[in-house]
Image (spheres, rainbow, N blue to C red):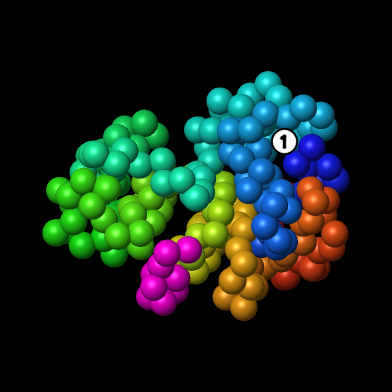
Amino acid sequence: PALAGVDLDVHSGEILLLRGPNGAGKTTLLGVCAGLIGLTTGEAVVLGEDLTTNRRAVRRRVGLLGHDSFLYQDLSVVENLDFWSRAAAATVADGRAALDRLGVASRLFELPVHSLSAGQRRRVSFAAMICRRPELWLLDEPHAGLDSAGRDLVDGLMAEAATSGATVLFASHELDRAEHVAHRSVTISGGVILDETPPSSETRADL
């Protein structure tokens, strides 16, 4: 199995970094926590919900930013945000606010997603996620495709999310940057957690 020895508790308001080589199981773990990958053995409880019986409930409460954008390539930026806002019972205004927060220029709003640069698509994907106001952020290489300003923005958003009580679980190879923003980190290899840094004083109550 892709995950063979993962025993992990994450806390409310915590930013947890997943370290490890390609193929270690980080992306699989994020997919399991998002309710997108089913368990064959073991158990997982996310936001108090048992993933084996309540995957749909979990999906409504988490936000996933993965390698795939989950955006509709032929729709415009605002059409995508309107769709994801409605799907999450958010408002169109929430979608616009998220675009502004991610620094997506208004001149891009009416363009189809497929015409955007990789960095612009990444920002739109991030906006689509945060407009849902998830309680658990699941980020796979969140800095990928972004310039320095965009990476700083992502770090700030993760910190704000944790301060507001959300939990952030992210995988990154950019360890110098990632370790600066994370409260704690674990190393995964071959689907097994090898080591863990101690929690910082900023971690809060159990998730």
Q: Position of residue 120 (x, y in %)?
A: 31, 60
The residue under the point 80% across, 51% down is 190
Left or right: residue 195 compared with residue 173:
right
Q: Quadrant of residue 118?
A: bottom left
The residue under the point 73% across, 30% down is 39
Camera-side residue of 46 and 13: 46
Left or right: residue 41 compared with residue 132:
right
Numbered marks: total: 1
The amino acid pointed to by label 1 is Val
Residue furthest to the top in view is: 53
Left or right: residue 35 compared with residue 9:
left
Q: Quadrant of the N terminus?
A: top right
Camera-side residue of 126 and 72: 72
Camera-side residue of 141 and 11: 141
Q: Quadrant of residue 71?
A: top left
Q: Position of residue 163 (x, y in %)?
A: 54, 62
Q: Does any portion of residue 7 appear in the rendered image?
A: no
Q: Position of residue 106 (x, y in %)?
A: 16, 58
Q: Is residue 85 above or below residue 65?
A: above
Span colored in magenta: 144-152
Q: Position of residue 199 (x, y in %)?
A: 76, 66
**Badge 1 is on which residue?**
45
* The stretch drawn in magenta includes residue 148: yes
